[in-house]
Amino acid sequence: MRSLWLNSLTRQGLYRLSTLKYSTSVEPKEPVVKTKSIPGPKSVELKKQLDSVQATGTIQFFADYDKSIGNYIHDVDGNILLDVYTQISSVPLGYNHPRLFNVFNNEQNVKTLINRPALGVFPGKEWPEKLHSVLQSIAPKGLNKITTMMCGSCSNENAYKAIFIWYQNKLRGNTPLTDQERNSCMINIPPGAPKLSILSFKGAFHGRTLGALSTTHSKYIHKLDVPSFDWPIASFPQYKYPLEENVAYNKKEDEKCLSEVQDLIKQYASKVPVAGVVVEPIQSEGGDNEASPEFFQSLQAICKKNGIALLIDEVQTGGGSTGKFWCHEHFNLDGPPDVVTFSKKLQLGGYFHNDDFAPKEPYRIFNTWMGDPGKVLLLEEILKVIQEDSLLANVNVAGKVLKEGLLSLEKEFPHILNSTRGRGTFLAVNCTNTKVRDQIVGALKLHGVQTGGCGEISIRFRPALIFKEYHANIVLDRFRQVLKAI
């Protein structure tokens, strides 16, 4: 079986195995690096070809997805890397999971795939049932409506619009739209185009479209030369670690940041009122910055007190990698957030909400595709595998091994590593500076481990849900080899 998977991963062979329960025994035993550098020569040549038609500055190497399997990604130069980055946290079941090959191995699902509908106007007859049985089955408790989208950025972008519409409806008391509102919005002035804002946090990442980008504050390269809205930006807690030894300090961080949120809401009330707050359960691209359940509980209370919406951006954290399907489930909130956005591991994008955030008029939240029913078919099978294989429990077991191992390395190499943190397998550790961090990430790749940086000094870990304890030990062993060589 292993030779079939690794040496002749043909479509026919994958279909033959697609009815079997996935086992990591089909994976390589360990990473294999054949080239002196990554990218290797074949990747370099492909990059030159692509560079003639597309910018390639972000490309690390070219993958061979025919050969990639489970937790391992193959590149075109024959290198086999244990992937704990997984396409920026967007591969829930690893590569070429056999159960997913079944999804389009029937005529009805293939028709759904090739006749991709404009869901807002011509949905297929099966669409209502799929929304109920698939997406509503994972809805955060208390949120009964779902708006589907394509990606994380457009999910947040349209969620902001829904919040603004909700806020204005409250102000007008659900009275009919006026001619003045209709006409003024066409030339971008109030009252039809009101001056409203979304409050976000320093270090946040919510996307690269214009509205979402105005709430993104992780790296200048994302924002440079692009106009932004004048919207308030609050500080996000910057904790000291280990948490149990810095309780008083971190509590003061919470209090300081929450006080800043309240002050900004007051400051902007007279010029660009805050209609909503957007926040990540763990600031991911911005450095894996986390905040306490108490912080999020108080933030929700501030939003309710001021009559503004709380949007929790679960684009990267949603889907199980923190040990719960939604990371905000760790926070014991007083009721659901008003809006929860998602994408990545869930294959398509969108946001959960309640009736209040569903516009009454058609076309107010709209685009051609409004999601992708083919991706929902994949998600349907992914959710079955997560449940049948107890993958959330697996995440907690493997995550405990990985986190304890990182803490051990931190003690062994205190001059290099610090501040191990995270939930489940959604973990990170800090390095002494950016140069050392980048050196370690590069060296790990040459030792067969694909990971990624975030923020200025952090290494983040985003393995698939099928990542096991022994995978964690391989990562930790290679990590230790790298640290000893620095």
Image (cartoon, rainbow, N blue to C red):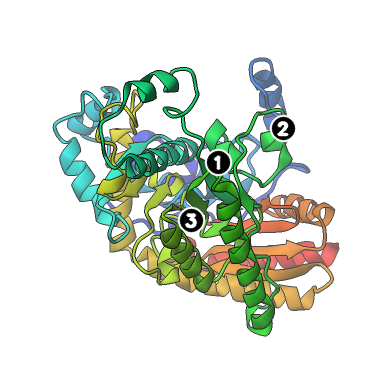
| Foreground label between 1 and 2 | 1
Q: Any mark on residue 272, and which?
A: 1
Q: What residue type is disc 2 on?
A: Leu
The quarter of the picture where residue 252 lies is bottom right
Whole-Å distance between the Cαs marked 1 and 3? 30 Å
307 left or right of 31?
left
Q: Nearer the viewer, residue 120 or 69?
A: 120
Q: In this view, does 26 lie above or below 114?
A: below
Residue at left offset 43%, top offset 23%? 185
Reading the chain from its start, which is encountered first: label 1 or label 3? 1
Q: In which quarter of the image is the C terminus?
A: bottom right
Q: What residue type is disc 3 on?
A: Thr
Decide: few, some or many residues near mark 2? Use Cα within 10 Å; few <14, some 14-19, many ≥20: few
Q: What residue type is disc 1 on?
A: Val
- For disc 3, the marked residue is 317
Q: Any mark on residue 224, and which?
A: 2
Whole-Å distance between the Cαs marked 3 and 2? 26 Å
